[in-house]
Structure formats: C-alpha cells, structure tokens
Image (spheres, grey):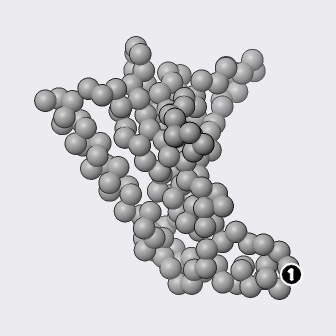
C-alpha cells in the first residue's frame, strides 16, 4: 500500500483531543511550506504523564472565521509494529443552533474584536464541514479495498 492509513483530512467537530500514541504515525500539514510533519515524536515525560494534542476541527474553524484554523492531518503506517490511536472528537449536537449575533453585537458595543462568523439560526449539520466525516469514511474504505487488491 501507500503507507497512508488515513488520508489527509480535517476533523469535523469543534476540537479533537488526541493522546500521543505509543507508536508514532500522526502527521500534520505545515501551512508555511506544505510539508507533512510528525507530531507525536514527543519525548516521554519523566513523571509518566500523558501528552495530549489538541487539534481544531472544521466546526470551530467555521465558527471563528478560521481565526482558529482546522488542523489538516493524516495517519501513516509506522515502520514496524502496530499503531493504535484513540482520539476524542468533541462535536456539538447536529441540531444545535449557532447564533453569534448577540456576541458580535456585544463586542462591537464594547469596542472589542470578536473572531466569529456571523451566524443566526444555523445548525451544526448545516455547516459545510458536517459532510467531511462521510468523505473521510468513504476515502478510508476505498483505501482498504485498494490495499487488499
């Protein structure tokens, strides 16, 4: 196969909490030069504490007009052994209504900048990012079939 276990994507929700796996393989796309860089090559902590990465998802990016931009990432096969990842994707309910107008108005009145997209009565499932989960799964199933052929 290509060595890519999960194709490049942004996570759908607000944030993803991802404990560093014992075997590396998670890579993020560096925006400055378009290079894939490993993000789990973090030295073990002397106290044994777990290192957790926090990645911004599409919903938070859309909500903040990309002030907090989504983290495009992929997973590649480790040189040897098995990689087990256990990310926690925090998403809003698909029927949750996003209304940023009160916050935008309050910021305007106080002279502050609010890094929010203007939304009123928009549900999470109406955001373009909501469909990306289907795309990720579709690409994964295609890659599994391709690798088995």
Relative image position of residue 47 (x, y in whole percent): 75, 21
Please indicate, yes or no, whether residue 16 appears anywhere in the rendered image.
no
Quarter of image, res 3: top left
Residue at the disc numbered 1: 110
Quarter of image, res 119: bottom right
Q: Residue at x 51, y 40 (%)?
A: 34
Q: Residue at x 43, y 74 (%)?
A: 126
Give the structural element (helix, strand or loop) at label 1.
helix
Relative image position of residue 30 (x, y in whole percent): 57, 40
Position of residue 73 in the picture relative to residue 149 (left or right): right
Relative image position of residue 105 (x, y in whole percent): 74, 85
Mark 1 surroundings: few (<14), some (14-19) or many (≥20) residues within 10 A = few
Relative image position of residue 93 (x, y in whole percent): 49, 67
* Foreground residue among 41 and 87: 41
* Foreground residue among 92 and 136: 136
Quarter of image, res 110: bottom right
Q: Residue at x 62, y 39 (%)?
A: 53
């Amino acid at each position: 196969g290509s060595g890519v276990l999960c194709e490049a994507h942004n996570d759908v929700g607000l944030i993803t909490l991802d404990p560093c796996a014992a075997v590396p393989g998670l890579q993020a796309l560096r925006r400055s030069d378009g290079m894939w860089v490993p993000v789990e090559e973090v030295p073990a902590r002397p106290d044994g504490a777990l290192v957790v990465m926090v990645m911004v998802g599409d919903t938070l990016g859309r909500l903040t007009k990309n002030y907090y931009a989504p983290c495009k990432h992929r997973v590649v096969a480790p040189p040897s052994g098995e990689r087990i990842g256990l990310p926690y994707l925090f998403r809003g309910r698909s029927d949750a209504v996003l209304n940023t107008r009160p916050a935008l108005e309050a910021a305007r009145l106080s002279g502050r900048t609010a890094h929010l997209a203007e939304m009123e009565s928009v549900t999470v499932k109406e955001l373009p990012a909501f469909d990306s989960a289907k795309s990720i799964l579709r690409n994964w199933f295609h890659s599994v079939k391709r690798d088995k052929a």
